[in-house]
């Protein structure tokens, strides 16, 4: 059976913790999209870890961790990340990497930086991990698959062709040093050394795993609102963040995904530019940012302070719908225990009309939040394990949100640890 863990919002919903928790029952954990541009924070017996490329199953001996074909594979970063966890006492993870995954090249990272520099104040707030140039090249069919590392003659020729076009931009648009095909070839030979032990036919592996009745977990990065088709385009990421893409980015039939566990945070946060209707500023934002997540809401990759906002029912309802949520996990609820009243965004006012449907970007820029205030519970809910033991106002908050978004909240997360979870009809 295949389950997907994905985000309903702008990312940073706490997917890493949920995947790490569910990975306990999984035989295989698969990353199917994105790259080293975002990070998951996981707290477990080994300590606190920020994972960027590694699947969240790496802390379990029994899981096979898979980098699917949909991922932007940064080979040196992957190898460094493996080392960073084994250096801290985690046993060497069981890993396989798709021979069809494409490689983030050093020039993708450079082009990301150069383009952000060129755009100046109009930049996308990229993490400069090369993700947009990587996916552009993939779909322009000048990307390099892992399998191509093993075809030296063809690879050399391809690099010459790539450098010809890239160098025109480097010389005339960015005024930066040119690329040398020979140097890139040497770099790729080193990459081949590093990645060879892991390379595998992932879709064939997963087909067998399914036949054997294995439990497979697909691990998404970011959330619906960062999806290039259904998100806040163009302030999105460059690969699909939706569960549906899990089938493509892992290489499995779409009908095998039986559960879409959609992670939704009890308040909002976002990184990078783009419309954010329920955003708050000043002291309210400072306070929530300081108390948020586990040790504050700061980017796992960049350390940047995240933008903060109240829970947004409009965006979350849409976020869950596009994911096809079978279950919603409501996370980081413990953080809200300090508030007397908790505002929730229940509608968008656009040109004088109120809607609960999430609009396209142009309209979104004009939307003003319609807020409703719910009573706070003014207590620490960490450590509670049974839903009925939550304070009444806390349950009211959960049930109000559930009704507004229209998808069942079957788990509530009330702390960063694996065991900080309250089940409510989760099967
Ligand atoms: P991801 O990218 O969706 O995995 O999210 P991040 O890891 O960037 O952000 C989630 C942050 O919240 C991390 O620091 C987690 O340790 C923390 N976290 C996850 N669930 C909870 C929770 O229920 N309560 C608290 N206080 N922190 C949580």
Image (cartoon, rainbow, N blue to C red):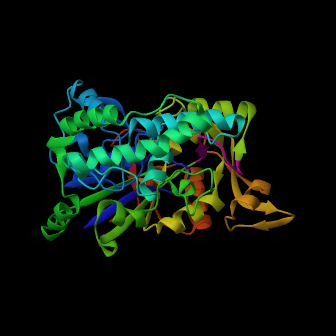
State the image coordinates of residue 399 (x, y, percent, origin top left).
Answer: 56, 61
Q: State left or right for residue 64 relative to residue 132.
A: left
Q: Up-down: is 77 above or below 1?
A: above
| Occupied quadrant, residue 80 | top left
Give the total of numbered labels. 0
Residue 86 colored in magenta in the image: no
State the image coordinates of residue 129 (x, y, percent, origin top left).
Answer: 46, 37
Which residue lies at the image location 18% right of the left edge and 58% below the top edge? 201
Residue 268 colored in magenta in the image: yes
Residue furthest bottom as drawn: 255
Q: State left or right for residue 285 relative to residue 226.
A: right
Nearer to us in this view, 19 or 338: 19
* Residue 379 visible in the current orientation: no
The prevailing secondary structure element of the residues shown in magenta is: loop
Which residue lies at the image location 62% right of the left edge and 42% below the top edge? 124
* Residue 301 visible in the current orientation: yes
In the rendered image, the quadrant that contains the N terminus is bottom left
State the image coordinates of residue 67 (x, y, percent, origin top left).
Answer: 28, 50
Nearer to us in this view, 89 or 398: 89
Residue furthest right as drawn: 352
Residue furthest top as drawn: 87
Nearer to us in this view, 423 or 264: 264
State the image coordinates of residue 120 (x, y, percent, origin top left).
Answer: 68, 34
In the rendered image, the quadrant that contains the C terminus is bottom left
Residues rendered magenta in the picture: 267-278
Q: Up-down: is 86 above or below 419?
A: above
Which residue lies at the image location 62% right of the left edge and 65% below the top edge? 404
| Occupied quadrant, residue 259 | bottom left
């Amino acid at each position: 059976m295949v389950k997907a863990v994905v985000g309903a919002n702008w990312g940073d919903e706490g997917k890493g913790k949920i995947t790490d928790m569910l990975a306990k029952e999984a035989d295989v954990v698969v990353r199917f999209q994105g790259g080293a541009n975002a990070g998951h924070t996981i707290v477990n017996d080994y300590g606190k870890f920020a994972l960027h490329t590694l699947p969240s199953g790496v802390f379990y001996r029994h899981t096979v961790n898979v980098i699917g074909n949909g991922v932007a594979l940064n080979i040196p970063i992957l190898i460094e990340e493996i080392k960073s966890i084994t250096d801290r006492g985690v046993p060497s993870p069981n890993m396989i990497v798709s021979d069809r995954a494409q490689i983030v090249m050093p020039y993708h990272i450079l082009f990301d930086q150069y383009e952000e520099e060129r755009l100046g104040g109009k930049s996308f707030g990229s993490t400069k991990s090369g993700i947009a140039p990587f996916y552009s090249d993939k779909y322009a069919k000048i990307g390099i698959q892992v399998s191509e590392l093993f075809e030296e003659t063809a690879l050399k020729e391809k690099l010459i062709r790539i450098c010809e076009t890239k160098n025109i931009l480097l010389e005339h648009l960015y005024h930066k040093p040119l690329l040398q095909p020979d140097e890139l070839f040497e770099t790729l030979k080193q990459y081949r050394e590093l990645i060879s032990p892991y390379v595998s036919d992932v879709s064939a592996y997963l087909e067998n795993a399914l036949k054997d009745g294995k439990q497979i977990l697909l691990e998404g990065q970011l959330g619906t609102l960062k999806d290039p088709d259904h998100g806040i385009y163009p302030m999105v990421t460059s690969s699909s963040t939706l569960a549906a893409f899990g089938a493509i980015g892992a290489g499995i039939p779409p009908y095998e995904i039986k559960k879409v566990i959609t992670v939704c945070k009890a308040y909002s946060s976002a990184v990078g530019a783009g419309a954010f209707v329920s955003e708050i500023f000043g002291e309210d934002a400072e306070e929530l940012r300081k108390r948020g997540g586990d040790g504050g809401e700061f980017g796992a990759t960049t350390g940047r302070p995240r933008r903060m906002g109240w829970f947004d029912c409009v965006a979350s309802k849409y976020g869950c719908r596009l994911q096809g949520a079978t279950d919603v996990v409501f996370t980081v609820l413990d953080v809200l225990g300090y508030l007397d009243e908790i505002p929730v965004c229940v509608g968008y006012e656009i040109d004088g009309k109120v809607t609960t449907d999430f609009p396209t970007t142009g309209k979104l820029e004009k939307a003003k939040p319609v807020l409703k205030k719910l009573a706070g519970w003014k207590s620490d809910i960490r450590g509670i394990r049974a839903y009925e033991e939550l304070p009444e106002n806390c349950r009211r908050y959960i049930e109000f949100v559930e009704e507004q978004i229209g998808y069942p909240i079957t788990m509530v997360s009330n702390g960063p640890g694996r065991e900080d979870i309250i089940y409510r009809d989760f099967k």
